[in-house]
Amino acid sequence: MEKQSESSLQKTLTDNFQKMSKLSIDVMKPLVENMFETVSNMNNAVLEGKIPTLDLSSFQNNKNSNCCPPKEECPPHCISAISRQAMSGERIIVPFLVKNNCSSTKTYRVGVRELVDNDGAIAPNQPILNKASVTLQPGRSESVLMSLDLNKFNTGSTYVTEIVLREKEINQNICFTLHVNNSTPTEVSPNDEKKYKQKWLNWQSHFYCDPHKKRIDVRPDVAQNKS
């Protein structure tokens, strides 16, 4: 009886192991086939001179991720530029407009740095602004004038400076360049005055010159008798 029980138990265990093995093979068979297919495709690609690549884009950090601190964007060195040419000894006025493109009222302080030449030497005279600040409603603009006396400026030199606009913390510059050169003067030739003394007589005639007025000489003896 005991031998029969042991034989029955052994058969049951054997059957269970066989079923588990068959189930494992059925589950693993597609995976193994897929692996062999992948390896075969890679071998064919290598033989054809195509090197397979691995896409690691999904493993890279997202550039727009909130985990990284935002990059600071510096303002451009010059938001605008002004260039002028003038002669030594002139006095020039340079106008520019400051406009508020924001949706709220803004107040901008206006200043100007030292005017220097290309060697860094300070100019004989410095520019002057007619306003120190402007307050602008949205969409409005205001004119600012910069004046400069070019007395004792060297002909052929170039001078530079920056007009600075500042709301709170950031300087926004208008780069200004001055070229001191001798300009070609305008030549003017006055007309003969006789041209302006001609009169129009009538539609059938032509211009003529006015006759000279006769000079009346007064003799000294006649003048004495009248007195």
Image (cartoon, helix red, strand yellow):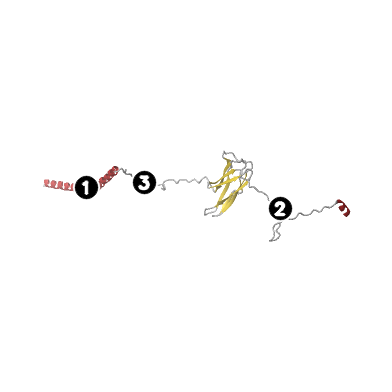
Q: Quadrant of residue 51?
A: top left
Q: Residues within 10 Å of mark 3 (few under 14, many from 20)?
A: few
Label 2: state its secondary structure. helix
Q: Report the disc number at residue 194.
A: 2
Q: CA distance from mark 3 to mark 1?
A: 35 Å
From the image, tell me which residue sits under label 1.
25
- Rendered residue at 36%/46% (across/down): 57
Q: Mark 2, mark 1: which one is toward the viewer?
A: 2
* Disc with the residue nearer the chain's start (2 vs 1): 1
**Crowding at mark 2 (Cα within 10 Å: few <14, some 14-19, many 20+):** few
Q: Secondary structure at mark 1?
A: helix
Q: Is residue 214 left or right of residue 159?
A: right
Q: Is residue 128 left or right of residue 64?
A: right
x and y, in percent, of residue 175 in the image: 55, 45
Is residue 101 toward the left or the right of residue 185 in the image?
Answer: left
Q: Nearer the viewer, mark 3 or mark 2?
A: 2
Amino acid beneath label 3: Ser
Marks 3,1: beta carbons within 8 A: no
Type of amino acid under label 1 = Ile
Gap between marks 3 and 2 measured at Cα: 92 Å
- Residue 57 — which label? 3
Give how far across and how far down residue 54 sits, in percent. 33, 44
Q: Dividing the picture into quarters, in which one does residue 181 lie?
A: top right
**In the image, what residue type sits under mark 2?**
Lys
